[in-house]
Image (cartoon, rainbow, N blue to C red):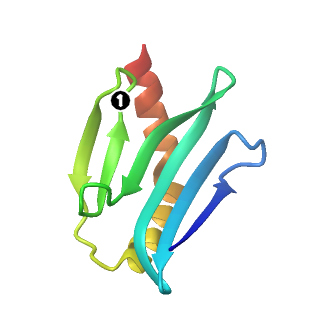
Amino acid sequence: MASKRFYKYLNNEGSERLRFKIITQKGKVIDIVVQYETMIDGKWTAIVRYDCSHGFFHRDLLIPNGSQEKTTIAIEDLNIAIGYAEQELKDNWEIYKQKYLKASK
């Protein structure tokens, strides 16, 4: 089993990023995490996470009070799921951040 972890930054300031974790076995992707994180008060804060930790691919919207809003995503091929999650977060990170900050107040 091999594990690959890396970041992709969404802005020039380096305060918005996607965190990736991809686990493969015999060349096949068996587990993923793609998480949008933002810098708040000097620390990285997770806002949205795509993963398959419960046996299915889904999105967790993370709420400042510690709860989560889970949405199943009907994609079984984890290679496709990685690309989907990355593009969806690149397209919508600003909206997710505004919702999170609004819920923080």
Circle 1 packing at 10 Å, graded few (<14), some (14-19), many (20+), is some
Residue 89 percent across, percent down from the top left: 48, 55
Residue 10 percent across, percent down from the top left: 65, 52
Q: Is residue 24 left or right of residue 69?
A: right
Secondary structure of the residue carrying numbered label 1: loop
Q: Quick check: 16 above or below 53? A: above
Q: Residue furthest top?
A: 105
Q: Residue at x 34, y 41 (%)?
A: 61
Q: Quick check: 84 above or below 25? A: above
Residue 76 percent across, percent down from the top left: 27, 76
Q: Residue at x 37, y 57 (%)?
A: 51
Q: Is residue 36 left or right of residue 43?
A: left
- Of the residues shown, which amino acid type is indicated by label 1? Ile
Q: Quick check: 16 above or below 51? A: above
Q: Residue furthest bottom?
A: 27
Q: Residue at x 70, y 49 (%)?
A: 11
Q: How many marks?
A: 1
Q: Residue furthest front?
A: 1
Report which quarter residue 4 is drawn in: bottom right
The residue under label 1 is 63
User: Nearest the camera: 89 or 34?
Assistant: 34
Q: Residue at x 42, y 13 (%)?
A: 105
Q: Is residue 14 left or right of residue 41?
A: right
Report which quarter residue 82 is drawn in: bottom left
Residue 62 percent across, percent down from the top left: 37, 36
Report which quarter residue 14 is drawn in: top right
